[in-house]
Image (cartoon, rainbow, N blue to C red):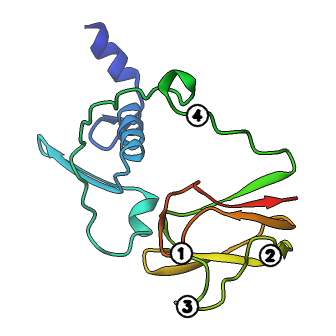
């Protein structure tokens, strides 16, 4: 009985849908990236469309069922206990240049071409260092700070991950 009294006090839209219920539905739509929802029950029809519905490419949205993956087994920390030598820390005057994409690393604009930069070469902010091809797009990676290329860490044509060090630059 108390539940009915509470529901009757809630602000209602149309045939009696409480605003709080609609807010919950909209929050769930945002949480699960649902752009449009149609619902019909007991003669009441509800059609909600978020801003995201108007910004899609026009193709129907398809959502995959959530997948459950087991957590990976914890890895032993590198060091003497696991049998691997510890990597020495990078000197304070050296910085890594990290890959901003997952893709393929290229040192030049064409196969066999002159590399954009070489070990020992001085670079200025904005100088082109390499290309990372991601989804058929050639993304030019530029120096974010001036310095000297100390080491090229990736071979030409090799795949790279997001955040993977590509170069070491002495500042």
Q: Quadrant of the C terminus?
A: bottom right
Q: How crowded is mark 4: few (under 14 residues within 10 Å), some or many (20 or more)?
A: few
Q: Distance between the residues labelled 4 and 3?
A: 36 Å
The answer to which of 2 and 98 lies nearer the viewer is 98
Q: Are marks 1 and 2 in contact (CB under 8 Å)?
A: no
Local SS, label 4: loop
Mark 4 or 1: in front is 4
Q: Distance between the residues labelled 2 and 3?
A: 23 Å
Asked if one can make out residue 44 in the rendered structure from this viewpoint, the answer is no
Local SS, label 3: loop
Give the residue pinned by disc 4. Answer: 85
The answer to which of 3 and 14 lies nearer the viewer is 3
Give the residue pinned by disc 1. Answer: 156
Q: How far apart are marks 3 and 1 (CA)?
A: 10 Å
Local SS, label 2: loop
The tag earlier along the polypeptide, 4 or 2, is 4
Which dot marks residue 112?
Answer: 3
Give the residue pinned by disc 2. Answer: 126
Local SS, label 1: loop
């Amino acid at each position: 009985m108390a539940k009915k009294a509470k529901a009757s006090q809630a602000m209602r839209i149309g045939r009696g849908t409480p605003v709080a219920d609609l807010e919950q539905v909209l929050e769930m739509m945002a949480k699960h990236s649902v752009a449009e929802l149609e619902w019909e029950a007991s003669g009441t029809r509800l059609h909600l469309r978020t801003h995201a519905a108007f910004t899609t490419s026009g193709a129907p949205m398809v959502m995959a069922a959530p997948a459950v993956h087991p957590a990976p087994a914890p890895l032993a920390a590198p060091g003497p206990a696991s049998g691997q030598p510890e990597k020495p820390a990078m000197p304070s005057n050296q910085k890594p240049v990290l890959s901003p994409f997952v893709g393929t690393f290229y040192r030049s604009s064409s196969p066999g071409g002159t590399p954009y930069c070489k070990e020992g070469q001085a670079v200025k902010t904005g100088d082109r260092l390499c290309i990372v091809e991601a989804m058929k797009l050639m993304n030019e990676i530029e120096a974010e700070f001036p310095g000297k290329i100390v080491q090229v860490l990736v071979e030409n044509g090799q795949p790279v991950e997001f955040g993977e060090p590509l170069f070491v630059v002495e500042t």
